[in-house]
């Protein structure tokens, strides 16, 4: 007897024979991916609401409004780089909040408070702008906005 391992029914010379593995290329199965996309598409189509504008002919009511109740025109305060104030294009010699408040109160007409637009130079001090806001508060103006300039070359909306 020869040494080694023998399989039953086989001869001693055969030994173990392994088949060589064949390298298979990985496959990506697209069918489940397409199924999932179709389910998502159907879900979106079923849940989307489409608004339809109904075109009905209606007659709207007419209101009579007095022309005397027109809103006040906005007031403009200009703050220069050296701290000077201008109200409606006129220079205010005193740089205090009290003097600016008195000038604002003289410009207010009617019952409704006007809108105040503050145009401050980019190099004006922060305190000069705060003084203008404080004067507006003392004059009873609560609607304040600041004028800005878009940088050159910036897209407009």
Image (spheres, helix red, strand yellow):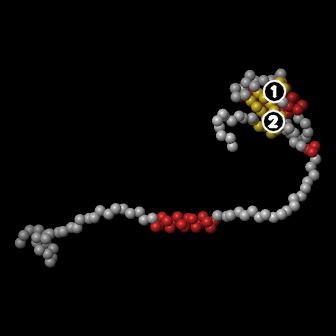
Q: Which class describes the residues within 10 Å of circle 1: few (<14), some (14-19), or many (20+)?
A: some
Q: Is residue 134 visible?
A: no
On screen, residue 46 above or below 127: below
> Residue 133, how many percent across, how many down?
78, 32
The span from disc 2 to disc 1 (Cα, nearest Å) is: 13 Å
Q: Is residue 17 visible?
A: yes
Residue at coordinates 91% horizontally, 54% vertically from top-left?
63
Mark number, residue 105: none
Position of residue 78 in the picture relative to residue 108 (left or right): left
Position of residue 46 in the picture relative to residue 28 (left or right): right
Residue at coordinates 78% horizontally, 63% vertically from top-left?
55
Of residues 107 and 27, the one nearer the viewer is 27
Quick one: SS at disc 1?
A: strand
Q: Which residue was labeled with disc 2?
A: 116
> Residue 111, how many percent across, how many down?
90, 40
Q: Could you tell me which quadrant the C terminus lies in?
A: top right
> Residue 85, how many percent across, how many down?
80, 26
Mark number, residue 86: 1
Q: Quadrant of residue 81?
A: top right
Q: Which class describes the residues within 10 Å of circle 2: few (<14), some (14-19), or many (20+)?
A: many
Residue at coordinates 66% horizontally, 34% vertically from top-left?
151
Quick one: SS at disc 2?
A: strand
Q: Could you tell me which quadrant the N terminus lies in?
A: bottom left
Of residues 154 and 74, the one nearer the viewer is 154
Of residues 39 and 124, the one nearer the viewer is 39
Position of residue 46 in the picture relative to residue 89 (left or right): left
Q: Quadrant of residue 152?
A: top right
Residue at coordinates 21% horizontally, 67% vertically from top-left?
18
């Amino acid at each position: 007897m020869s040494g080694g391992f023998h399989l039953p029914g086989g001869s001693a010379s055969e030994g173990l024979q392994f088949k060589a593995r064949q390298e298979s290329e990985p496959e990506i199965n697209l069918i489940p991916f397409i199924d999932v996309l179709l389910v998502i598409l159907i879900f979106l189509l079923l849940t989307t609401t489409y608004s339809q504008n109904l075109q009905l002919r209606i007659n709207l009511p007419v209101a009579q409004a007095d022309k005397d109740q027109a809103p006040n025109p906005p007031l403009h305060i200009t703050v220069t780089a050296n701290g000077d104030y201008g109200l409606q294009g006129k220079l205010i010699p005193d740089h205090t909040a009290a003097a600016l408040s008195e000038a604002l109160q003289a410009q207010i007409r009617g019952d409704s408070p006007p809108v105040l637009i503050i145009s401050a130079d980019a190099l004006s001090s922060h305190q000069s702008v705060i003084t203008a806001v404080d004067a507006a508060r003392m004059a009873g103006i609560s609607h304040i906005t600041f004028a800005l300039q878009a940088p050159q070359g910036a897209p407009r909306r």
